[in-house]
């Protein structure tokens, strides 16, 4: 393989690594928002997922069990969010923020013993034969389980949302909880499920960070990825395949950040580190300026509390 | 036994004030449980967290020092939250205020002019306002969600400050530490209580609280804020400009956060460092809610949450626990507050027998 091919391959693998945690978190949030619930606690859920996954992997010595721990912990945080916003009908914005503040603190507290420790990262599962293809084999068929899962979920969730009865009900609940309730659908229960799926996915995103991306735990290691995921959902106008596009675009921005100086860009590292955040603002602006398109696609009841009456 | 929520005919005035107290009690109880789970004597830890830090006058002055930025930012944010403008990037606005004020201090290095401090104050406010203006512009012009843009800008501000203290503004005699020069005497806030760090910022904060109180209760813009928050439709019929309020909330919140940033660098810190705030901008969100979005309440809540910082520090010194305990307590307090607030609009109905829907189901299956 030529040098430029090697660099291209390395760059592509970096993009995939940076994009996958965002993809998980954003796909989960997409389902949550489709049910009409705004979850601003994604960042906190990712952190709790990351630290739990790391703890699970360290204690059991099995990275896969670690991944499950991360997903489960994210789901528990979502359950807390749900109890507050769905059962007690609290303000979704304030509740999400408190989940994030709490998650940042609790994860730091739990993770105190793990700082500086490393675990065995999740190993790659090359697809037999296909992965032997030069270049494309390594690019497409030699990844860990979570990368395959994240891409499969894009297709799976697209199908679920737009082609199944369950997806139709989910969208109905998000667009008009009143009508859905009148039709006899258990709005609150569906929202609980959507929220918990979102938490599970945020937990998986966190697990990816602490078990694969940088196989160690450090305080606040998500560095705003939970918030970027929220922006990605808006960018994607609540469509899974566009989340995939957005997440990989952000992976590309990360490349610039990591290797910018290597490319001969004489810019202080702090400015390169700003890029993902500035890019997030840019995509939000680009997508939000078209109010009609946004309103057409966004779940109509997003962020509004619903109280079933009789 | 099950419980259900029954809507009150009118929101309970009593619960509005009782809910923060209830939340505090529940937080203390959960803290006790948490410490016990960690294998620490819960009562000892709670004592070290809540009582020990303010058991002498120095401790109390430190409480005030930490409460100043929280109160300043908290009153600013509460205006926005009332009007449904969710500025959660106050931390970044604080940083930019600190940067602007610090820039003036470094520019006027070794000047003895009495105008240095006022200039820093104006620069700090303008710096914070400028950083608040960006989400306001993006929201009013492009409809971009201010929650996300203001938060993203917080990361940008932190990196910008990091660049300055690592690069152009680094102390030339500082052995390469990422810090600016120590500010000159003329750029430091006067101390108002001898042998403590309590500075004149306390008086500024109280003046701001009083001003905002008057603004909210006596002026048209204050009235508009309240109407837009509680009855957006009515506000539209009345012709109140939503965009104007977005600008007003973000500029005011940003300006006050910037002022807090100026006060931090010219008060307790005395120079620019990579981290000028231990998350005051985020904690102030909790301060605003616990304080019921009212200037007086915010002042009390500011003191309470300042205690959570002091308590965290004391626990670290006394028991070797991490500072993160502070964040856990802050998060729990907000959870419980939000949960208790349900009692303002609803009352709990305890029932022994199965709930109505279940009995209907039973009849159907019978």
Image (cartoon, grey):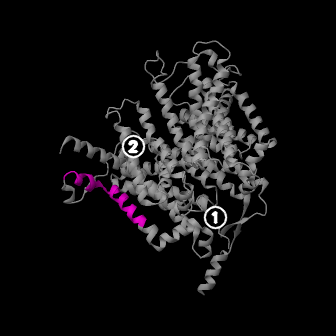
Q: What element carries label 2?
A: helix
Residue B226 located left or right of residue B281: right
Crowd class of label 2 (few under 14; some 14 to 19; many from 20; radius 10 Å): many
Question: Is residue A233 visible to the viewer in this orientation of the structure?
Answer: yes
What is the x, y in percent for residue A146? 35, 56
What mark, if any, has residue A253 been given in the picture?
A: 2
Whole-percent x, y for residue B190 in the image:
68, 20
| Quadrant assignment for the C terminus of chain B | bottom right
Residue B188 shown left or right of residue A65 in the figure: right
Classify 10 Å Cα crowding around label 1: few (below 14), some (14-19), many (20 and above).
some
Q: Which of marks 2 and 1 is in front?
A: 2
Residue B244 or residue A251, whichever sits in front:
B244
Q: Which residue is drawn at 50% across and 37% down?
A: B156
Report the side of B356 relative to A75 (left or right).
Answer: right
Mark nearer the N terminus (2 vs 1): 2
Q: Read off the magenta span.
A: A134-158
The subunit letter for the residue under badge 2 reads A
Asked whether the residues under marks 2 and 1 belong to the same chain, the reply is yes
Q: Mark 1 points at which residue?
A: A306
């Amino acid at each position: 393989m030529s040098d430029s091919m090697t660099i291209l391959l390395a760059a592509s693998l970096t993009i995939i690594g940076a994009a996958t945690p965002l993809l998980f978190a954003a796909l989960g949030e997409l389902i949550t928002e489709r049910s009409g619930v705004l979850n601003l606690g994604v960042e906190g859920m990712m952190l709790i997922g990351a630290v739990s996954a790391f703890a699970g992997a360290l204690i059991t010595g099995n990275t896969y069990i670690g991944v499950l721990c991360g997903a489960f912990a994210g789901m528990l945080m979502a359950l807390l969010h749900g109890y507050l916003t769905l059962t007690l009908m609290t303000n979704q914005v304030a509740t999400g923020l408190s989940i994030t503040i709490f998650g940042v603190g609790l994860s730091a507290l739990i993770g105190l013993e793990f700082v500086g420790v490393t675990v065995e990262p999740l190993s790659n599962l090359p697809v037999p034969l296909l992965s032997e293809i030069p270049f494309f084999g390594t690019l497409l068929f030699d990844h860990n389980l979570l990368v395959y899962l994240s891409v499969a979920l894009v297709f799976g969730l697209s199908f679920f949302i737009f082609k199944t009865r369950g997806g139709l009900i989910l969208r109905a609940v998000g667009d008009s909880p009143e009508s859905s309730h009148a039709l006899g659908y258990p709005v609150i229960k569906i929202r609980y499920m959507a929220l918990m799926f979102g938490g599970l996915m945020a937990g998986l995103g966190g697990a990816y960070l602490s078990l694969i991306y940088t196989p160690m735990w450090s305080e606040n290691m998500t560095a705003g990825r939970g918030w970027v995921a929220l922006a990605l959902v808006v960018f994607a106008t609540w469509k899974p395949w566009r989340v995939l596009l957005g997440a990989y675009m952000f992976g590309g921005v990360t490349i610039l950040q990591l290797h910018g100086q290597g490319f001969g860009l004489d810019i202080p590292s702090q400015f390169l580190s700003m890029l993902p955040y500035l890019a997030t603002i840019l995509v939000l602006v680009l997508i939000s300026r078209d109010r009609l398109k946004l309103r057409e696609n966004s779940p109509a009841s997003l962020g509004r509390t619903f109280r079933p009456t009789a | 036994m099950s419980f259900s929520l029954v809507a009150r005919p009118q929101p309970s005035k009593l619960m509005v004030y009782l809910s923060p107290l209830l939340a505090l009690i529940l937080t203390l109880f959960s803290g006790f449980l948490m410490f016990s789970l960690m294998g620490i004597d819960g009562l000892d830890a709670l004592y070290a967290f809540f009582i020990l830090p303010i058991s002498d006058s120095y401790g109390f002055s430190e409480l005030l020092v930490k409460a100043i930025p929280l109160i300043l930012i908290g009153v600013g944010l509460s205006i926005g939250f009332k009007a449904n403008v969710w500025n959660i990037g106050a931390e970044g606005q604080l940083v930019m205020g600190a940067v602007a004020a610090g820039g003036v201090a470094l520019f006027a290095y070794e000047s003895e002019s009495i105008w240095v401090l006022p200039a820093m104050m104006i620069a700090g406010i303008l710096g914070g306002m400028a950083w608040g203006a960006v989400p306001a512009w993006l929201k009013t012009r492009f409809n971009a969600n201010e929650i996300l843009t203001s938060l993203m800008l917080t990361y940008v501000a932190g990196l910008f400050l990091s660049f300055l203290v690592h690069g152009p503004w680094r102390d030339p005699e500082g052995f390469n530490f990422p810090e600016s020069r120590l500010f000159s005497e003329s750029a430091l806030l006067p101390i108002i209580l001898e042998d403590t760090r309590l500075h004149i910022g306390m008086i500024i904060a109280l003046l701001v609280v009083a001003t905002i109180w008057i603004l909210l209760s006596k002026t048209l813009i204050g009235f508009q804020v309240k109407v837009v928050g509680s009855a957006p439709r009515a506000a539209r019929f009345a012709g109140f400009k939503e965009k104007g309020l977005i600008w007003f909330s973000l500029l005011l919140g940003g300006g006050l956060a910037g002022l807090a940033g100026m006060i931090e660098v010219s008060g307790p810190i005395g120079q620019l460092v990579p981290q000028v705030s231990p998350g005051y901008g985020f904690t102030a969100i909790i301060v605003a809610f616990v304080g019921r979005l009212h200037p007086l309440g915010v002042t009390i809540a500011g003191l309470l949450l300042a205690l959570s910082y002091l308590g965290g520090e004391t626990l670290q010194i006394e028991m070797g626990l991490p500072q993160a305990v502070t964040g856990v307590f802050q998060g729990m307090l907000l959870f419980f507050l939000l949960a208790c607030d349900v009692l303002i609009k609803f009352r709990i109905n305890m029932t022994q027998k199965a709930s109505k829907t279940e009995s209907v189901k039973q009849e159907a299956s019978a």
